[in-house]
Image (tube, coloured by chain):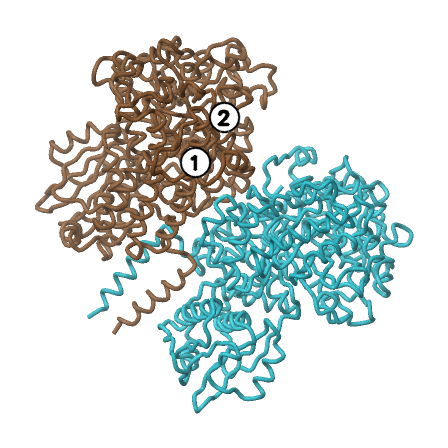
Chain colours: A brown, B cyan
Amino acid sequence: MKRPFYFLVFLAFLFSCSMIKADDGYGLWLNYKKAPVQVLEEYRQEVKSCFIAGRTPTMAIAEEELFSGLTALLGIPVEIVTETEDGCVVAGRLSDLPFAIPKNISDKVTQTGSEGFVIATLEVEGKNMILITAHSDTGVLYGVFHFLQRMQAGKDIAPLDMVSIPKVTLRVLNHWDNLDRTVERGYAGFSLWDWHRLPGYIDSRYRDYARANASIGINGTVLNNVNANPLMLTPQYLEKAAALADVFRPYGLKVYLSVKFSSPRDIGGLKTADPLDPEVRDWWKKKMDEVYERIPDFGGLLIKANSEGQPGPQNYNRTHAEGANMLADAIAPHGGIIMWRAFVYDNNVPEDRAKQALNEFKPLDGQFRDNVLVQVKNGPIDFQPREPFHPLFGAMPGTPLMMEFQITQEYLGQATNLCYLAPLFKECLDSETYAKGPGSTVAKIVDGSLEGHTLSGMAGVANTGTDRNWTGHLFGQANWFAFGRLAWDHALTSEEIADDWIKMTFAQDSYIVNPIKDIMLASREAVVNYMTPLGLHHIMGRGHHYGPGPWVTGGRPDWTSLYYHRADKEGIGFDRTPSGSNATSQYYQPVADNYANLEICPDEYLLWFHHLPWDYPMRSGKTLWEELCLHYYQGVESVRKFQKTWKSLEGKIDEEKFNHVRMLLDIQEEEAVWWRNACILYFQQFPEMPVPEGLEKPDKTLEYYQRLSFPFAPGN
Amino acid sequence: MKRPFYFLVFLAFLFSCSMIKADDGYGLWLNYKKAPVQVLEEYRQEVKSCFIAGRTPTMAIAEEELFSGLTALLGIPVEIVTETEDGCVVAGRLSDLPFAIPKNISDKVTQTGSEGFVIATLEVEGKNMILITAHSDTGVLYGVFHFLQRMQAGKDIAPLDMVSIPKVTLRVLNHWDNLDRTVERGYAGFSLWDWHRLPGYIDSRYRDYARANASIGINGTVLNNVNANPLMLTPQYLEKAAALADVFRPYGLKVYLSVKFSSPRDIGGLKTADPLDPEVRDWWKKKMDEVYERIPDFGGLLIKANSEGQPGPQNYNRTHAEGANMLADAIAPHGGIIMWRAFVYDNNVPEDRAKQALNEFKPLDGQFRDNVLVQVKNGPIDFQPREPFHPLFGAMPGTPLMMEFQITQEYLGQATNLCYLAPLFKECLDSETYAKGPGSTVAKIVDGSLEGHTLSGMAGVANTGTDRNWTGHLFGQANWFAFGRLAWDHALTSEEIADDWIKMTFAQDSYIVNPIKDIMLASREAVVNYMTPLGLHHIMGRGHHYGPGPWVTGGRPDWTSLYYHRADKEGIGFDRTPSGSNATSQYYQPVADNYANLEICPDEYLLWFHHLPWDYPMRSGKTLWEELCLHYYQGVESVRKFQKTWKSLEGKIDEEKFNHVRMLLDIQEEEAVWWRNACILYFQQFPEMPVPEGLEKPDKTLEYYQRLSFPFAPGN
């Protein structure tokens, strides 16, 4: 009679876990739970065992994932069979399959390239199977994760007949991690990379990191900060990077590095870093040989040049193209690529910062080598809660433009605010540039389809750190997840992605999924409302960017708030129409007019493009001042609604996760009120108009908010 | 038929834990596992249920601990009964017990004071029970942990008749944690305190931290670095400290703070911090009122004054006593205490740094208020791998001297070397000072028994951080554990403590316990041998103190290596005999002679007290140079033996823990060779004698080792 045994083992295990917190969030969206009854039977019908074709380190991972995933999802140990049988899941490269497959399926596989996969139900010799196959073992691994995710989300698994091919070739995380383990704009603790103990000590977390990325199709990671330390290229650190690459490799995750343009001088002992200097070119060539010696599948380099004080080719009167091409030539023999950032800051303050990137880069279109991508932020300023899409998208048809999104919430509440970013990403990707008429969306430029570029990429500035739940705020995981899913397929909707993530992270029951989804889908607009409504931007606290700072002035004008909101007695907003900086002219028609023409300019971009009087009559019939106030108050109200909704989940989800989010929502409510009050009180000085009737009055003074100081705010 | 159900739940649970790593070390020594068969039956005989008397937050914790602990240890759910019954464990304060207990037991309880406890087997109304009782609920909680630890270690639990009373009243951790979350001399990641998100966000880890401390009797924690930031005393941060105090309180863990002596100027707006200035005295008084307003049971203050650039009373020509007493008067009304550090650095370089603390503090004996303790490091220099005990112990009979040990391994291999510190702690505690003749051990001075002080304390500089296993190196946990156990009872042996820790952390089987214990007990001597044998000290790398640096010179002499080893053509060692600095005269007789007299001075202190020629004939018959070499090589050999011994455990202990330690032992071996080669090559320049026959020759040059640089070594 074994019953007590299992019972005891289970109990003992439970209690031995007592301090481990099974739901501290470490498991991300990969905590396979037993499927709910309504689908369990179907799943058990369809899946009885698995068969793995081919033996590679990547296939071993696919096998382990399939076994542990299916066993947990089905609630019974799934056998790994050595001969295909009825009801088995077959995973393997096309070339490793032990049986011939129908032409209609093999035809599909031929389209999948090096990373795509096919999942199909088929019958071979009278046996019904589910086939997961691809050209590469990485493709198979992606297929395995996709298959398991369908089950985690309670979707049908029969009959299946699908092809999935990533729309973008480079899907990479950018870690702004420093060698001292601090993370610039990191709000989830410190760097995952324990540089000091590498290469000798391999933290088991490195594997879990690679696994998480593979599960959402991310195939590259830039290990270090774009404000790069030249020591990264010394043998001492290359050895450490190589150790990480060895761990990541079987997960299809390539290592990339950020480099400092002046490295030949900083660590090479040369007198110059002039990209046209033969010694410099030779130094980089030899350095790349050395890198590939250690990391044969090294991905490439990311460079921030002539921006915010970083050195670059302009220090030697060379163009960005000349700088990028020199590196491109050094790395080309090894098949590497260069990601050259378009986020540039002139040393002279421009009349309009929003125009600078295009002014500098558009003229260089066509001058870059084939293995260079220009990496462009989603908007022309800097990851603000809302920006119009960057005018460079569509302006450089001859150059692959890589998207740079920010997953870490530098300007969107950092790790204390719940803000689901998929709607922000989608808003940009779906934007019509009209570069080639209607349908020329940013997405089509990024994926290369509009101009037929084969090289394409999407980068996300990572929000990961040493915090046990990886992202500081549990819902930060959803942003990492959403970035990966959109980099693979930008056609997905924010809602689909949220739906999957919630089901994989919490549960499939609609009474849990729906309230959480409501919060997520409303969260980004809430943040925009209590921080920067109606097109306001760049009015946060100085340096750490934590909290409001509309009063920030002094120092470099385009690093102040006044430069951007331009509030005065007359009105508020940045005139970027032809009567102003004429930044609107950087867009194609009809986008340019759409923004420049006050009649049709959308409210959400109003103060981005227009300077308007405080009593300007809005479409709503209210004055601009009233409308501004209402948005700020609406933002706070949304958060209070989130709190209520969340409290309704008490007892229905894991207690630790519930409390984690509850505490953070309480902080978010305080911070939303802080933003609202500080901004209202600050702007109110100019029109001297009252806060509209019925709205709670700020309970503190403007001076109080201006005096607040946060010398140790993280990520700075 | 429920069998499958449990089986599936268990499996599902297992796999849902797949990414959680049940044995990542987070559970410390508190992962209750099912007792082995040889004791299980006895345990189940004796323990059938538990009865909790009295309701307080602390008793609720005791109940949860007893229930989950016993259930896991016995492998069956233990009922919590509301009426005492045969075979129940009764836990509660004496005043809360529902029955009268025999006088012989109640007499024992009367001796236990506010923290001690009694555990006794007794029969009441024909029911056999195990009683865990005390005056305070904290005492009961300590008793519960002690009882569970007996079972974790497989010890008898019947019949029990024991009293346990802490020998030292203040058992505190000193966290050298900064407000930016870096940790000075921290090698386990970053600070546990997420200051930015406090007080709103309470990390569940805070509770686990308090629980771990309570389990070993630690009753105080100094939250911030002794190099204190004055902002710690601002309302913004006191609010955060109060939130931590609220979490720690039910675990009997009091919060203390390090303060900067110049705070009245830094944050108080006063012109001076002169301790005799009425405004200053008033400022501190008000500040203490404010602190106790927020933290009613606040423990007190730790001060580093006039040391390494920190301000102090001497800046105003006042004595340490005048400075300490001013703070003592401010905090006395609230029942708080002052821990005043004796680790002082004169701005003028002393002829012998080892003499300074005594020279400055001995004259002040008797001048300190009753609520002041002077906190003295175990040795006169600075936490070296081996130092003679500090001469202040015994030199200030009129003052309670608090011991300051360093748990974090600043000079003992940081987080990459396995070094069990109990032997180091014991070596100091058991040292005979002869302050009052034989038997006047350091331990008796620290626990107050020699001079009859009621206030006594032992501080440990914490080795905890954000690393999942708390201490970076799994065996660092043993040092945290050993500190707590020795602070409670310094009579315990290093071996007893290691035995308990191994059984609680790994398993009780002798084939696992013995090899691990062999490594632990030999580890500290190994570190001494490959770093600083024969009394050498302070020859590590500059700044980060990582790795060897016998060549370190320049800057302040007493911060260089040459100042301490004094190696030259003639010989090596620091002459601290009457013919030299005469530091030996700071000790009582016969200790002074024992150290000063070359004939009897123990080898391990030889070069600490004597400067000797390279060919000095050692007791072994070898020359000093040969003996020095042999010790360095012996150190490396010991580590290689540790590696072999550890490998023999493969497959017998948890795989993740096994690999964690295996990787670190490999690093330790490399670092031991590094220390040995660098020191041998450096010292060899002077005698120009060869490395003795048969020893492997250093494979690198001295220049190679001198060129190594570690700009991002942690903890700096």
Q: Is residue A650 above or below residue A329?
A: below
Query: Hey, which residue is sitting farthest bottom in the picture?
Result: B126
Q: Which residue is mark 1?
A: A677
- Which residue occupies 54% across, 10% down? A316
Q: Give the percent coordinates (x, y) of residue A332.
A: 41, 19
Q: Secondary structure at mark 1?
A: helix
| Residue in view at x 9 percent, y 44 percent | A125
Work out whether mark 1 precedes mark 2 in sequence or the reverse, and give the earlier one: 2
- At label 2, the amino acid type is Glu
Q: Name the disc covering residue A290, or none.
A: 2
Query: In which quadrant of the rendered image does the C terminus of chain B lie?
Result: top right
Give the x, y percent position of residue A96. Answer: 23, 38
Mark 1 near mark 2, Cβ–Cβ under 8 Å? no
Q: Are marks 1 and 2 on the same chain?
A: yes
Which-is-in-front pick, marks 1 and 2? 1
The spot of residue B502 in percent (x, y) is 52, 64
Cα–Cα gap, marks 1 and 2: 55 Å
Q: Is residue B538 above or below residue A582?
A: below
Q: Is residue A223 above or below residue A67?
A: above
